[in-house]
Structure formats: structure tokens, C-alpha cells
């Protein structure tokens, strides 16, 4: 195959053999778990959670074996494809169910199954008293299977399969406590907003078919350099729309905060570590599109920047611990999107940040869950305070996560975020400043969260007796905390950049405008300012139990999610509602009314004509004769 | 053609007569005239079979059926002259005339072409020729009409049938009834008295004489009484007197008892 | 003469329906039901045998051809191609499911359950006949005849306002049929002038030359009739009413099977007989279809009555099918054909599950439900799966078809796809809103004592849902039937797929290119 | 022997018959007028038969007679029934089937 020189590498996997033939098992195990658990019925209630956890762990084991095998291969030979069956074909369009295992998906596999397993274990404790625990684990397994499909698929349509699969699992898990209307509404909202994003993926796939005649990574990547700029830009923007939906990026960010209605392990797994980062995966995976479409990349960077700030600002004002973390997630994914929008130089760092974020955010979410567990499911931080003594392990692990996310030197988040800031500054100083500012705000709101939860005065509700969670919950916390601290080793010797370069391309060398050490120092400084501000505003004062009403416009806006929901409500839902109601009226009165009107007028006419039926036979005969006379006359006239 | 020109006016007059005859019987008779004339026209037109059928079936059977029904309905039921439906008669005449005019005009204009005549078709006789076609080409239609006729007959029976609403009276019932009548109203139990007997012949129109010399009403038919043909007692008396005066004459006239 | 496979296939249910109708009224109530169920299963098995004998490489198969009315060239002519086979299978699969699911629905109707099940089988037979007919006249006769059983099913066994709904249904469809009759007669007039004399045989008509104007008029006649059947905006209002008043089983037969006749007819007759006119009409039809997709979706959101909602979803989905047909490329048409099958399954599941629910509570209104999931989790789960299938979740069967239609419309015009794709968002809205309002939240009044599905109901639904999932991942058996048929249709219409803009080498890897 | 006079006669008789149906109220007379119309048409059929030289016209006339017979039987039975219940043979009295 003739491939001209291009910055984006072509996806050209070898077919799987040896250990790689186990690839399908990675998906099949949790899928089997989901099927068994969901169809198994009540008799599995007692040990269903164990089956679920076992499946996740087994999948992790297989992933690990695969990863080790992959490590043993040549760096050029690390892309493996397993063809399972032809999904569908029409004309010359053919979609295969095939799995693509390469350096990128390998990392994702480890993240998903690894973090996933830990969260499964954690959930055993967290959901212990829920009578539908079996089903919860079924859904979790379903999610893991779908997420693995997403990252292993070798075709955009296959990605779509996983994409919607995780959407479904997310829907089911957000609405797991269906009896709460708020949960059901949040679940629906998440699904629908994601559907809006799916428009992008559907149309993107359509455009790819029109342009390349296929949606397989191999074909698209091979031909991308020949496609017109406009087509590539359009595909890129459509994929960005999809990413916005799944990764809660502006303007489709509104569902993520509501999604916190789900059980906390769900928030940790789906809405922090894995699913919401699928958008980043999609962009990085589609590097062959984006590398060739700088205009689309610009769009990605802009979206990343906006969301980064948006999430951070929201995070500053929320009193709900989960929503603060959700805002933070949004913001951190903004970083990743931003990095991936920078092109070849950024892809690897986006993924790096994705991994470290997966560790520390899962850690913190689980920590928050542990706190809630001890506080009778209260999520309001204004009811916390001084919990560090009541829950030492939770506190300690949470602190690791905290230090990681604010970018405390040496912790994993430091390395990953620093790299992004550095690259952003190199590429475009406005974007870089934005990232830097975001880091400062992160420092502020995370410190605020830390202080309000673990320090300051006790503001507990009556009858609440905070206690440390059981071991089945704390061990995963410890494991994740360790990863949060040590995640930075992935960057040791630029390992992750080299590892991913066969997939995303080799970045050209360019030096930042100021020395990178200076940038790191600057970043730490900015963060320190944020932390200090938080200390002054929160830590040094009494925290009121009820959120103060008299606050600035900015705080109010941040509390209202920067009016994202209000905007949707005003611009989309209300007019939509009215449109629907008007249409319904139109359908009943105009469309149906027209038909009914015909019927009514016919009845009226018939009622008049009816009177002609006098009952006299002779009258009828007369009219018949008249008819006959007319016929004869007509014949006569015609023949004359 | 002569037959035609003689019969055509007769038929038209008879048909018009049907419009004006007030009594249904007259209309029926006029219809018979038309039908018979038609039959003649059929034979003129080489259709002897239909001539026979027209006479036997139409005039003989169908028209007779009409007369039977007339009898049942009432021979002298006649139309009133007043038209009840507004404008019916006027419009009927107008439209009828328009129809007739256009129809006659129309058919008169049609050139039927040269008349072929049925000589070839009727070579072996009209009846065999008709049967030839009837039982080959039209056999299904023929079968269908037979079914139709049976259905019609059954239909007529069903329609004309009258349900018996009371059980049939037996002789015993009637005897019992008679005894009951006697007990309740003192109605005469025995048979009615026979009519009066007159020496020269049995006379149903002569009432029997009761011992007091009056006539017994019960002894004569009510129909005869209504017609007024019953001999009254005074009349009878004259007769009797006559006999008594000259009985010998009578006998000698007969010459049987010499 | 070879074995009359198709005649038996379509006459057997009709014969069985007569048997069911003649079962003495004094016998046990279950007897007619058992006979009906058995007969429908036998039909299913028979159709499966036919499907196994079907050779995907050949076009029309199992053909039977006898002269019927010589005077105007009508034939009793049957044949089976890929499109027909798909719908035959759909019919034979759905009918037993419906019979089992509506086991007791015929008990409270105007007539006895005997008649209920007899009409159902009768309908099955006629529908099969429609899918098999390869003679326009025979098709027309059967097309109109299908109205009879459905009229009685709606009018005899439905809700309180069933008489009105049945009449409306009948009038609409008769109106459409009337227009089609005019076109059928027109077709006779044209074919009578052709050298071969009058004929209604599809195979003859396809090769006949029609004038441009004539072809367009005739196309319109057929298209309008099929559009009423489908139904498309603005002739759709009979469907919601009929679906609301009919029993769930009736609605399934109506929407899953009978309405397919409309789209089936569009492929076989509109495209098959009038290729030129079809191309001429494409822009208008595509716009109308897209409008109906959105209109149906929005209307579905507005409904409070569950059956009406499902009816409007069908209006929307059917327009996807029409869109796929008229974009005139193999992706669109394959998608449309597959969609016919999948939509049949998902709508059947939806109607049946909601039917079970409505029967339990006695109200079709969404607003009278809430929190059903808590008391009847199995019912809720099945409703969710059916709903997800209706909103084309990947992994469930509808996805493949809807995706192909979207890709096909993208090939036709990116704008068409851009508007049509909004339909998937609307689909998510109406399904999930319905699910949320009925199944979740606090338990509503009167819902608390609802019982979960019983074994019969689950058994009836299980095969449908299983098929939905299996075909979602492995639609190949159906596609292998459909793809050659689509190829033939497109050849008849004279359309070919545009080559991709770049990367022509990708075409080398596909099997169709070599042909 | 031309056919036209026969046809014209037939037309005249037919018209008279039809007017009769319209103006007479006695059901039996009406019926007779119908018979008159049938007979008129028979005349036309037989005339056509002669002019065309085939016997099909006569066959048709024959069938008309048969059908007329059947019709009369049923019709008269109906009249009888009506008369029996309504004591009237006027067709105007049987006008309940209206509006």
C-alpha cells in the first residue's frame, strides 16, 4: 500500500495470534457476567456481587496478560487486530466486528478493568444494604463490557456500539434508584444529551463512508491524507460534537452534574474515570483525522478551554461534594480535550492526564462515597467538617487524590497537568494562560472541598455518627491513592510518549518560550495562590451550615451551573414544549380536523339528500325513468 | 305486414286503455289483447315457438295468475282517480312523453340494415333450431333459470304462507263448544231446521213453516236471504192455493197417474 | 407442476382460520385458541422451511403462475424474492407471538374469541398473499382484502371508541385503495395497448415502456395508496386512533405487518414499475419523509396515551423506511428493508408490553402511571428493552437498519441526513420520557397492586426480544437475503452507488464490486 | 318486411308501459304495466333476431319470459302479503321505508 509521508500513522494491525486470541475474552467476561446477573433472577441475589466482581477481575487479569505480551513485542508490531465476524454489509459498505488492540487501547484496557475491578470491590461494601445489589453489579459489568468494546473496536460503527452501550449503562446506573424522580430525570437527561452528541458520531460515520467508502480505522487512516480539507474538518467537528456529548464538554455539559444522582461508585467509575473520557479517546483515536484537519483542532481547543474554565468555576460554588467533584471532572476533561486538540504534541499528554485523572478522581469519588457512607448519605459539605479524625483512612487517601489533582509536585497530577500547560503555552500562549488559570482555580475549589470536609468546625446533622468504612471499601481507596501518587512514573523517561507514538505519531521537537522548569514553577505558584485563597476564604473562617444567600453575581451564576440548564430550559425546552403542544393541536384540529370536517359536511349533505327518499315507489320509478330519458337523449345527441 | 298494420293500432289502443281502465280486471283483459296480438306478431316474424310460449305461458299462465290474485284481492277494487303524490302524474306524463319521443326518434333512425330473415336459421324447424342453441351455448343460463324458477316458487310459497295461530279444532272440540253455547246462551243444540218442503220440488229458497204458520229464518241460507230470492210466506200461500184449487189438472197434465 | 410452496404458505392460515371459526361454541374456550396457535406455529415452521430452501443467488423463486382472468390479463401468480421473504418471515414470526400474547383479549369482545383468532389467522394469510403476489391485480385484490379482517378486529374487540376508529381506518385505506384502483386500471389501459396484450404480470410490466407523463401519473396513484398505508404525513391520523382503540395484538398486526405493505409496495411497485417516475419524485418524497420523521417524533412526545405514542413512533420510523427506499442507493435500501423487519419486532414488543401494562391498570394514559418498576420489575425491564430497540440502540436490531438508512441518506444528500438524524434524538426523548413517567418515580395511585408478567406473557415476548438482540449483533442471515434483492431493485431503477471520494482501493475488498 | 315498424311499436308499447307504472297506484295494475314493458322488449328482441338472422334474440326473449314468470310469481306473492296485512293494494300505502 502506497502511503505518502504523513504525520498521522496508519492503523495497520497484524491479525491476532497466540495470547492475543484471548482479546475477545476481555469483553466477553463482563458481558457474560451482565447477562447472568440480569437474567439470573433472585436466586443469584446472595452471591451475584461476587460473580460480577470476579468477572471484572478476570477481565483485568486477561488485560494484564495481553499488556505484558504486547510489551514483549517490537514497538512497530504492537498493533493487533482480531476479526470476529462481519456485522453488516450493504452495497460496498461493510462493517466488521473486529477488535483493535494497540498501545492506546492497551492502556485503556488496564485503566478500565483495573479501576473497574477496584470499584467493583468497593461497591460490594457500598451497596451492601441495597436489595437490588445483584442488578447493580449486572449493570456495572454491562458498563465494563461496553466500555471495553468502545476502546477495542476497530471501526467507528463498532465504537458507536460501545459508545451507546456505555450510554445505556450510564442511564441505568444514574437512574439506579429509580424511585427517586430526580434520579430518573437525571438518567433520562444524560441519555438524551448524549444522543445529541451521537448525532455527531452518526453523521461523522456517514461522511466517512461518503469520503472513504468505509468506517474502519484501517481504511480511514490510510486514506485520510488524500481527503479534502473540508471533508476532514467536517468529520473532525462532528466527532468533536460526539465527544462533547459523552465527555460533558461545553455546550453539552449539563448532564454531568445531574448524573451525580447515581450511586457514588458509579460516579467514580463512569462519570470520572472512564466513560466521560471516551470523548478524549475518540479524538486521540481519530488522530489521523485531526492531525490533517487543523481547523477542527482549533475547535477542539476552544471547546477544551471553555469547559476547563466552566467546570472549574462551577466547582468553586457547589456545596454538594459530588457535584464539586463533577465540576472538577468536567474541568479536568477540558484539559484533556485541550491537549488532544493541540495535535500530535498533545495526544500523548491527553492520554497521560486521562490515566492519572482516572486514578485520582476515582480515588476521590470513592472517598466521597466513603464520607457519605459515614454521614448517612448526606452530600452537603456544609454538614461535614473535621472528619479527618473520624475517617482517617478515607482522609489520608483522599488527601493523596487532592494533592494529585492540584498538581502538588511529585504527585501524578503534577506531571500530567504540567505537561499540558507546557505544551499549551508552547503552541498558543492564550490557551496556555487559560490552562494555567484553570490550575489555579482547581487549587482553590479542591482546597475548599478538602477544608470543608475534613477540617474546619463540625457541622454534622444530629444523630450522625461518622465512622470509617469497612475494609472492602478502604482497600480500593488505598490502592487508588497509591496510583494517584505514583501515576507519574508513566512519564519516566518520556515512556508514555514513546509508547503511544506509533499510534498518534511522533511529535516534532519544539521548545517552549520559557524553560519548562520555569513553567512548572509558575504552575505551582498559581496553584499555591489558589490554595491560599481557599484557606483565607474558607479555612480561616467559620463555615456556615446554610449556604449564604447574599453572594456575588458570580457565585450565584456558578451555583446555577453558569445558567447552562436555564439556557437549555429557555431556548430549547420551553419553545420545544410549545412547538409540541401546538403541533398536537394542529394535528388534531387541522390535519385530523380536515378529514373529520369532510365527514361532517358529507353527513350534513346526506341528511338533506335523505329527504329525497320519500318511500313512494313511484317517485323512485319516476326518477329512474328520468335517468333513462337522459341517457337516451344523450345517446341521441351524441349520435346526431 | 298486413297483420302488423291491423294489430299495431289495436295493441296501442289496448295498451293506452290499460292506463285509463279504472277496474283492474279491465286492465288485465286489455293486457291479454296486447299479448295475444304480440303472439301473432311473433309468428309473423318466424318465431312459432315463442308464439306458442307467449300464448301458453304468458297469456295462459301468467295472466291467469294475475286474475287469481285479483280475485283474492277483490275483483272490484278500483283506483281512485285522485293523485296523492304531488306532481307525480304531470311529471310522469311529461317525462314519459319525452322518453317515448326520443326513444321512437332514436330507434326510427337506426338503420337496422337489410333484414336477413330466419329462413336459414330455421331450416330444420324453429323448435329444433332453438333447442339446438339452448342446450348447447345457453345451457348454463338455462340451468340457472331452472334454479331461478324453483327458488321463485319456493319464495312465493314462503311469502304466501300464513301461520296457523290457533290449534286446529277437532270434532270433539266443536261438540263441546256447542254444548257450552247451549248451556251459556241457550243456543239451539240440534241441527238447523231444513227448508220448507214443497210438494213439487225440493226448494232451498223456501223457508220452513213453523207451527204458527210463520216462516223459520234459520231454515234458509243467509246468502239467499241477502240476495232477496227467498220466497216469502204470502207468495207461498198463493202457490198453495193454486194447487189446492186444481190438483187433478196438474196430475192429468203430467199424465203419470191416470 | 412443481410443489406449490407459496400457495400452501398463504392458503394454510386462511384454511385454519375457517376451521377456528367453525369450532363449536360449546367446546372449551381454549380449543379455538390452541388451534389458532398451532396453525400459526405450523405456518412459521413452513415458512422457515421455505427460507431454508431459498437460494439467495436467484431472484424470484418458487414461482407459480396460472392464468386467472384472461380478459384483462390477470394472473394468479406468486413468487418470492428477498424482500418478500423478509416480510413473510416477519409475519409468520409475529403472528404466533401475538396469538399467545392476546390469549384472553378476545374474550370480552363483541363476538366470541373464535372469531377473534379466526380473523387473525385470516389476516395472516392475506398478508402473506400480499407479500407473495407478483401480479398487480392479485396484489390489489389481496391488498384491499386485508382491510376486512382488521376492520372486524378493531371494531369488534377494541376500546370504547372502537367503532369510530375502525370506520376511520377503513375509510382512509379504502380511499387510498381507490386511488390505487384507478392506477391499476390505468396500468391495464397501457398494457392493453402493448404488443403482448393486456397483462398484470409484474415481470411483463417491468419491461413495458411507459410514457413519461403516464408513468408519473400511475406512480402517483400507487404512491398515494401506499403513503396512506404507511402512513405518512398528512394522511396519518387514522393510525393513532386505530392503535388506541384496537387490542394490543390487533395494533401489532396492523403496525408491524399490514403497514409494511405500504413500504413493501413502494419498493415492488413504485420503484419496480415506474423507475423514471420514482427518480422524478425522489426529492419531494425525501423531503416529505424527513418531515414526517420529525413530525411523528414530536407528536409522539406530545401524547399522553401510550398506544397513540407508539403509533406516532411508528409514523416516524416508517418514514425512515420510506427515506431509505427513495434515496436510491444500496445502503439506504438495505437499511429500509432490514428496518421493515426490525421495526416489526420492536413495535410488536412495545405494543405487547404496554398492552400487558394497560390491561393491568385499565388506563392507557401515561399520567395515570408511575413507579411501576418497583412492583413489576420484569415488565419494566422488558419495556425498557423494547423501548431501547425502538430508539435504535446499537446492539439491538433496529440500530443497524437505522444507521444504514442514515448513511444512505447521507450519500444522497448530507442535508437529508442532518435533518433525519434529529429523529434519533426525538426517539430517545419520547421513549425515555414514557419510561420515566410510567416506570420510575414514586408509585402512583392504583399502580401498587399491579402484578408482574406471568409465564405466558414472558414466553410470548421472549422470542421477539431474543431476536431483537441476536439480530442486533448478527443481522447477516437477513442481510444475505436482502442484499441481492436490493441489488436487483436498484438495477431495475437504474441507480448505482457513487464511489467513495478517496480510497477506491477499499472497494476492492468488498464482494459486491466484483459482480 | 322492414324491421323498423316493429321496433317503433316496441318503443311505443314500452313507453306506455313505463307511464303506466308511474301513474297507476294499484300494485297489480302496475305489475301488468311492467309485463307490458317486458313484452315490448321481447318484441324488439324477436325483431332483431329476424333482422340479424340468428336465433339468439329469440333465446333471449325466451329467457325474458322465464324470468318474467318467476318475477310475477314472487311479485304477486308479495302483493298478496301486503294486501293481507294492510287491506290495500295501493303501492302508495307501502311507504314506510323512507328517510
Image: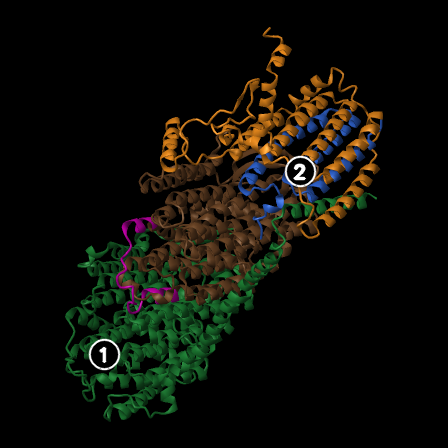
Q: Pick the residue in front: A193 or A418.
A: A193
Element at label 1:
loop
Mark 1, mark 2: which one is toward the viewer?
A: 2
* Stretch in magenta: C432-460
Q: Pick the residue in front: C354 or A249.
A: C354
A428 vs A395, left or right, is: right
User: Colour in which chain A is shown?
Assistant: green
User: Colour in which chain D is shown?
Assistant: blue
D10 vs C236, left or right, is: right
Q: Which residue is mark 1?
A: A378
User: Colour in which chain C is shown?
Assistant: brown
Identified at 70% across, 17% down, the residue is B128
Q: Position of residue A353 (x, y in %)?
A: 34, 74
Q: Pick the residue in front: A483 or A623.
A: A623
Identified at 60% across, 37% down, the residue is C74
Single out the residue that lies furthest toward the top.
B258
**Chain to which mark 2 belongs:** D
Rendered view: A555 above or below A247:
below
Q: Is residue D67 visible?
A: no
Q: Position of residue B10 (x, y in %)?
A: 79, 31
Q: Which mark is residue D29?
A: 2
Q: Which chain is orange?
A: B
Amino acid at each position: 500500500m502506497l502511503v505518502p509521508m504523513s504525520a498521522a500513522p496508519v492503523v495497520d494491525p497484524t491479525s491476532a495470534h497466540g495470547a492475543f486470541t484471548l482479546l475477545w475474552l476481555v469483553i466477553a467476561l463482563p458481558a457474560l457476567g451482565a447477562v447472568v446477573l440480569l437474567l439470573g433472577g433472585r436466586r443469584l441475589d446472595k452471591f451475584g456481587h461476587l460473580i460480577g466482581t470476579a468477572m471484572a477481575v478476570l477481565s483485568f487479569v486477561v488485560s494484564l496478560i495481553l499488556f505484558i505480551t504486547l510489551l514483549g513485542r517490537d514497538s512497530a508490531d504492537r498493533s493487533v487486530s482480531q476479526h470476529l465476524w462481519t456485522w453488516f454489509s450493504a452495497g460496498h459498505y461493510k462493517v466488521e466486528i473486529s477488535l483493535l488492540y494497540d498501545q492506546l487501547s492497551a492502556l485503556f484496557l488496564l485503566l478500565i478493568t483495573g479501576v473497574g475491578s477496584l470499584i467493583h470491590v468497593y461497591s460490594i461494601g457500598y451497596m451492601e444494604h441495597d436489595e437490588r445489589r445483584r442488578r447493580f453489579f449486572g449493570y456495572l459489568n454491562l458498563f465494563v463490557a461496553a466500555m471495553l468494546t468502545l476502546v477495542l473496536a476497530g471501526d467507528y460503527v463498532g465504537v458507536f456500539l460501545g459508545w451507546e452501550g456505555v450510554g445505556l449503562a450510564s442511564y441505568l446506573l444514574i437512574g439506579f434508584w429509580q424511585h427517586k424522580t430526580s434520579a430518573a430525570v437525571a438518567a433520562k437527561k444524560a441519555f438524551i444529551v448524549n444522543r445529541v452528541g451521537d448525532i455527531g458520531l452518526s453523521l461523522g460515520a456517514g461522511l466517512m463512508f461518503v469520503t472513504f467508502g468505509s468506517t474502519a480505522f484501517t481504511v480511514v487512516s490510510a486514506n485520510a491524507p488524500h481527503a479534502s480539507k473540508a471533508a476532514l474538518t467536517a468529520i473532525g467537528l462532528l466527532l468533536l460534537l460526539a465527544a462533547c456529548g459523552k465527555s460533558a464538554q461545553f455546550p453539552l455539559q449539563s448532564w454531568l452534574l445531574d448524573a451525580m444522582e447515581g450511586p457514588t461508585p458509579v460516579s467514580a467509575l463512569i462519570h470520572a474515570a472512564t466513560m466521560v473520557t471516551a470523548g478524549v479517546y475518540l479524538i486521540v483515536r481519530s488522530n489521523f483525522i485531526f492531525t490533517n484537519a487543523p481547523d477542527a483542532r482549533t475547535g477542539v481547543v476552544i471547546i477544551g478551554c471553555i469547559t476547563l474554565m466552566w467546570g472549574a468555576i462551577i466547582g468553586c460554588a457547589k456545596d454538594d461534594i459530588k457535584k464539586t467533584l463533577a465540576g472538577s471532572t468536567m474541568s479536568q476533561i477540558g484539559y484533556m480535550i485541550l491537549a488532544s486538540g493541540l495535535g500530535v504534541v498533545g495526544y500523548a499528554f491527553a492520554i497521560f492526564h486521562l490515566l492519572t485523572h482516572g486514578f485520582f478522581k476515582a480515588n476521590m469519588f470513592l472517598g466521597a462515597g466513603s464520607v457519605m457512607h459515614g454521614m448517612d448519605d448526606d452530600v452537603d459539605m456544609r454538614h461535614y467538617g473535621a472528619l479527618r479524625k473520624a475517617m482517617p483512612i478515607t482522609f489520608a487517601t483522599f488527601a493523596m487524590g487532592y494533592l494529585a489533582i492540584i498538581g502538588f509536585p511529585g504527585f501524578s497530577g503534577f506531571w500530567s497537568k504540567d505537561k499540558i500547560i507546557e505544551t499549551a503555552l508552547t503552541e498558543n500562549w492564550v490557551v496556555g494562560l487559560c490552562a494555567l488559570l484553570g490550575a489555579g482555580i482547581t487549587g482553590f475549589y479542591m482546597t475548599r472541598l478538602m477544608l470543608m470536609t475534613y477540617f474546619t468546625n463540625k457541622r454534622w446533622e444530629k444523630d450522625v455518627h461518622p465512622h470509617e468504612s469497612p475494609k472492602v471499601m478502604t482497600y480500593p481507596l488505598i490502592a487508588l491513592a497509591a496510583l494517584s501518587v505514583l501515576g507519574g512514573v508513566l512519564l519516566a523517561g518520556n515512556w508514555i510518549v514513546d509508547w503511544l507514538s506509533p499510534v498518534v505519531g511522533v511529535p516534532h521537537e519544539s521548545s517552549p518560550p520559557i524553560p519548562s522548569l520555569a513553567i512548572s514553577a509558575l504552575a505551582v505558584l498559581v496553584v499555591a495562590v489558589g490554595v491560599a485563597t481557599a484557606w483565607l476564604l474558607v479555612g480561616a473562617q467559620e463555615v456556615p451550615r446554610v449556604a449564604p444567600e447574599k453572594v456575588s453575581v458570580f457565585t450565584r451564576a456558578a451555583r446555577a451551573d453558569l445558567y447552562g440548564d436555564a439556557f437549555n430550559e429557555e431556548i430549547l425546552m420551553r419553545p420545544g414544549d410549545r412547538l409540541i403542544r401546538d403541533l398536537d393541536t394542529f394535528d388534531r384540529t387541522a390535519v385530523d380536523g380536515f378529514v373529520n370536517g369532510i365527514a361532517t359536511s358529507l353527513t350534513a349533505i346526506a341528511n338533506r339528500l335523505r329527504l329525497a327518499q320519500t318511500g313512494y315507489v313511484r317517485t323512485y320509478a319516476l326518477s329512474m325513468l328520468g335517468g333513462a330519458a337522459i341517457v337516451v337523449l344523450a345517446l341521441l345527441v351524441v349520435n346526431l | 305486414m298486413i297483420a302488423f298494420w291491423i294489430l299495431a293500432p289495436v295493441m296501442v289502443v289496448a295498451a293506452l286503455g290499460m292506463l285509463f281502465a279504472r277496474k283492474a280486471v279491465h286492465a288485465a283483459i286489455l293486457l291479454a289483447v296486447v299479448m295475444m296480438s304480440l303472439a301473432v306478431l311473433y309468428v309473423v316474424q318466424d318465431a312459432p315457438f315463442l308464439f306458442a310460449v307467449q300464448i301458453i305461458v304468458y297469456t295462459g299462465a301468467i295472466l291467469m295468475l294475475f286474475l287469481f290474485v285479483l280475485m283474492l284481492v277483490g275483483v272490484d277494487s278500483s283506483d281512485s282517480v285522485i293523485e296523492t303524490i304531488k306532481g307525480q302524474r304531470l311529471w310522469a306524463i311529461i317525462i314519459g312523453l319525452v322518453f317515448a319521443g326520443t326513444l321512437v326518434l332514436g330507434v326510427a333512425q337506426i338503420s337496422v340494415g337489410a333484414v336477413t330473415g330466419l329462413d336459414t336459421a330455421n331450416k330444420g324447424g324453429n323448435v329444433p333450431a332453438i333447442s339446438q342453441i339452448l342446450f348447447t351455448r345457453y345451457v348454463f343460463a338455462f340451468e340457472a333459470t331452472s334454479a331461478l324458477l324453483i327458488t321463485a316458487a319456493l319464495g312465493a310459497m314462503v311469502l304466501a304462507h300464513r301461520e296457523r295461530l290457533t290449534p286446529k279444532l277437532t270434532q270433539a272440540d266443536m261438540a263441546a263448544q256447542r254444548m257450552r253455547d247451549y248451556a251459556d246462551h241457550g243456543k239451539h243444540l240440534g241441527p238447523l231446521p231444513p227448508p220448507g218442503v214443497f210438494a213439487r220440488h225440493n226448494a232451498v229458497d223456501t223457508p220452513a213453516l213453523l207451527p204458527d204458520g210463520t216462516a223459520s229464518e234459520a231454515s234458509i241460507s243467509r246468502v239467499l236471504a241477502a240476495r232477496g230470492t227467498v220466497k216469502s210466506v204470502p207468495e207461498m200461500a198463493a202457490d198453495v192455493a193454486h194447487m189446492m184449487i186444481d190438483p187433478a189438472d196438474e196430475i192429468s197434465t203430467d199424465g203419470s197417474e191416470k | 407442476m412443481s410443489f406449490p410452496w407459496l400457495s400452501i404458505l398463504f392458503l394454510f392460515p386462511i384454511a385454519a382460520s375457517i376451521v377456528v371459526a367453525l369450532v363449536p361454541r360449546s367446546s372449551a374456550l381454549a380449543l379455538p385458541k390452541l388451534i389458532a396457535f398451532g396453525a400459526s406455529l405450523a405456518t412459521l415452521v413452513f415458512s422457515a422451511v421455505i427460507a431454508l430452501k431459498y437460494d439467495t443467488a436467484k431472484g424470484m423463486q418458487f414461482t407459480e403462475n396460472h392464468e386467472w382472468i384472461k380478459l384483462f390479463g390477470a394472473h394468479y401468480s406468486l413468487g418470492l424474492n428477498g424482500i418478500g421473504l423478509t416480510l413473510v418471515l416477519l409475519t409468520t414470526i409475529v403472528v404466533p407471538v401475538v396469538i399467545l400474547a392476546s390469549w384472553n383479549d378476545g374474550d370480552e369482545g363483541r363476538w366470541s374469541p373464535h372469531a377473534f383468532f379466526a380473523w387473525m389467522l385470516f389476516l395472516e394469510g392475506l398478508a402473506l398473499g400480499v407479500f407473495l403476489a407478483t401480479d398487480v391485480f392479485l396484489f390489489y385484490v389481496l391488498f384491499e382484502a386485508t382491510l376486512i379482517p382488521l376492520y372486524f378486529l378493531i371494531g369488534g374487540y377494541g376500546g370504547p371508541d372502537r367503532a369510530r376508529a375502525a370506520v376511520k381506518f377503513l375509510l382512509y385505506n379504502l380511499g387510498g385503495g381507490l386511488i390505487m384502483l384507478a392506477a391499476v386500471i390505468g396500468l391495464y389501459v397501457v398494457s392493453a395497448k402493448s404488443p403482448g396484450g393486456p397483462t398484470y404480470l409484474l415481470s411483463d410490466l417491468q419491461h413495458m415502456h411507459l410514457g413519461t407523463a403516464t408513468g408519473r401519473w400511475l406512480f402517483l396513484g400507487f404512491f398515494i395508496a401506499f403513503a396512506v398505508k404507511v402512513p405518512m404525513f398528512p394522511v396519518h391520523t387514522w393510525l393513532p386512533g386505530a392503535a388506541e382503540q384496537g387490542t394490543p395484538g390487533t395494533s401489532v398486526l396492523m403496525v408491524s405487518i399490514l403497514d409494511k405493505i405500504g413500504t413493501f409496495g413502494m419498493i415492488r411497485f413504485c420503484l419496480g414499475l415506474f423507475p423514471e417516475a420514482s427518480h422524478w419524485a425522489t426529492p419531494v418524497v425525501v423531503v416529505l419523509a424527513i418531515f414526517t420523521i420529525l413530525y411523528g417524533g414530536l407528536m409522539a412526545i406530545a401524547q399522553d396515551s401510550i398506544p397513540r405514542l407508539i403509533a406516532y413512533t411508528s409514523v416516524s420510523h416508517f418514514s425512515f423506511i420510506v427515506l431509505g427506499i427513495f434515496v436510491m442507493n444500496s445502503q439506504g435500501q438495505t437499511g429500509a428493508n432490514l428496518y421493515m423487519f426490525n421495526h416489526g419486532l420492536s413495535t410488536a414488543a412495545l405494543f405487547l408490553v404496554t398492552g400487558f401494562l394497560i390491561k393491568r391498570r385499565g388506563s392507557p394514559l401515561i399520567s395515570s402511571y408511575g413507579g411501576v418498576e418497583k412492583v413489576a420489575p420484569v415488565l419494566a425491564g422488558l419495556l425498557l428493552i423494547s423501548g431501547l430497540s425502538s430508539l435504535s440502540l446499537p446492539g439491538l436490531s433496529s440500530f443497524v437498519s437505522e444507521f444504514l438508512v442514515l448513511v444512505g441518506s447521507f450519500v444522497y444528500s448530507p442535508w437529508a441526513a442532518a435533518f433525519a438524524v434529529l429523529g434519533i434524538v426525538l426517539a430517545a426523548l419520547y421513549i425515555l420520557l414514557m419510561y420515566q413517567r410510567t416506570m420510575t418515580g414514586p408509585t402512583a395511585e392504583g399502580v401498587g397492586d399491579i402484578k408482574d408478567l406471568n409465564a405466558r406473557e414472558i414466553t410470548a415476548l421472549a422470542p421477539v426480544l431474543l431476536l431483537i438482540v441476536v439480530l442486533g449483533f448478527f443481522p447477516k442471515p437477513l442481510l444475505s437475503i436482502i442484499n441481492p434483492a436490493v441489488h436487483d431493485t436498484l438495477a431495475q431503477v437504474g441507480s448505482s452507488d457513487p464511489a467513495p471520494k478517496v480510497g477506491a482501493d477499499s472497494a476492492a475488498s468488498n464482494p459486491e464490486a466484483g459482480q | 318486411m322492414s324491421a323498423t315498424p316493429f321496433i317503433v311499436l316496441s318503443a311505443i308499447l314500452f313507453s306506455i308501459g313505463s307511464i303506466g307504472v308511474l301513474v297507476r297506484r294499484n300494485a297489480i295494475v302496475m305489475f301488468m304495466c311492467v309485463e307490458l314493458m317486458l313484452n315490448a322488449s321481447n318484441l324488439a328482441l324477436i325483431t332483431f333476431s329476424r333482422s340479424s338472422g340468428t336465433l339468439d334474440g329469440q333465446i333471449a326473449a325466451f329467457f325474458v319470459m322465464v324470468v318474467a314468470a318467476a318475477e310475477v310469481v314472487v311479485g304477486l306473492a308479495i302483493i298478496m302479503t301486503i294486501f293481507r296485512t294492510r287491506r290495500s293494494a295501493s303501492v302508495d300505502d307501502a311507504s314506510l321505508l323512507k328517510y
